[in-house]
Image: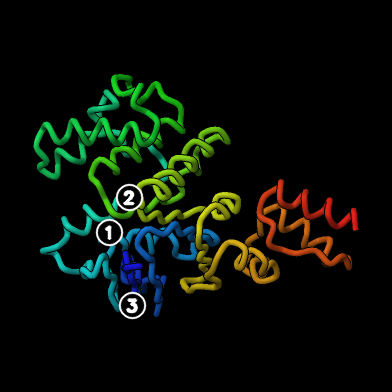
Amino acid sequence: MSEMIVTEHLAYTYPGMDDMPGIAVFKDLNLTIEEGSFVAILGMNGCGKSTLAKHFNSILLPSGGRVLVSGIDTANEERLMVIRRSVGMVFQNPDNQIVANVVEEDVAFGPENLGIASPEIRNRVDKALKQVGMYDYREHAPHLLSGGQKQRIAIAGVIAMEPKCIVLDEPTAMLDPRGRREVMDTIRRLNREKGITVILITHHMDEAAQAGRVVVMHKGSIAADGTPEEVFSQVELLHSIGLAAPDSVELCWQLKMAGYDLPLDKLTPKDCAQTLKDWLMN
């Protein structure tokens, strides 16, 4: 599997204001994201996860070290458009990304800025809307849609630019449970069926558990990195940095602390319930 994004000894310091010293976020961060993978990045507010995401398509540039996107250094200004075509960004508030009064016009905005020919734009818009399940809404006004639908439109606008990778920075933070579910279903389908590399920045443990890999950040460093089962079974570590495991794992951990020998790798309520049933039957 080839490398989609690589950070090598990444350092970044936010500039200070009014002669005040800058704020260092990273000092020596090394991370590799494989092409076609689905990676969730977790951490408390201020740990650096959103700052890291902005390095993935040159919104921010390193103070030290480097970031490579498909082998291209993000500091190479001559390749900036290539990098941003490769890595699309979706942010918390879909209203901040919607720029047109009609859904299909909004999805067409990105390809138009890339100079894509009109017939190809039409094809891309239709395909992107179908991929996120919003084709039937193509002539609707975005402001009349639900939060989850708006976020899917924002994702479609990124897909229409045909990136290899989509970085989603807290995309469900402002959504209700139904909207969260719609967006997560869309993300999983794009990764599974289209092979798009997905990097999900989230604070929802149940969302991170759906990824193939979980990276936990703490104070600008990587505190844990592995499969969801490997990471979330480290309950004490998560607690020590202010995080919790999914509810099902927390329940099994509490029972384990009380003396009952239960595994800590059951990430869904269904799997947890089956584990408890099997334990009670024995």
Tell me: residue 120, above or below residue 265.
above
Residue of label 3: 8
Give the label on residue 89, or none: 2
**187 or 60, which is in the foreground?**
187
Q: Residue at position x 12%, y 31% from top?
A: 119
Residue, x 30% and y 78% (percent of image)? 65
The earlier-in-sequence mark between 3 and 2 is 3
- Locate residue 150: give its quadrant: top left
User: In which quadrant will I find the N terminus?
Assistant: bottom left
Q: Amino acid at mark 2?
A: Met
Q: Residues within 10 Å of mark 2 (few under 14, many from 20)?
A: many
- Helix, strand or loop under label 2: strand
State the image coordinates of residue 27 (x, y, percent, origin top left): 40, 78
Residue at the image point whose x is 52% and y is 63% from the top: 214
Displayed quadrant of residue 3: bottom left
Q: Secondary structure at mark 3?
A: strand
Alpha carbon of mark 3 to alpha carbon of mark 1: how far?
15 Å
Kindly identify which numbered label has been placed on residue 57: 1
Left or right relative to 223: residue 277: right
* Residue 99 visible in the current orientation: no
Give the amino acid type for the residue marked by disc 1 in the picture. Answer: Asn
Q: Earlier in the sequence, mark 1 or mark 2?
A: 1
Q: Residue 8 at what x, y percent from top left?
A: 33, 77
The amino acid beneath tag 3 is Glu
Q: Is residue 56 above or below residue 73?
A: above
Mark-to-mark CA distance, 1 and 2: 8 Å
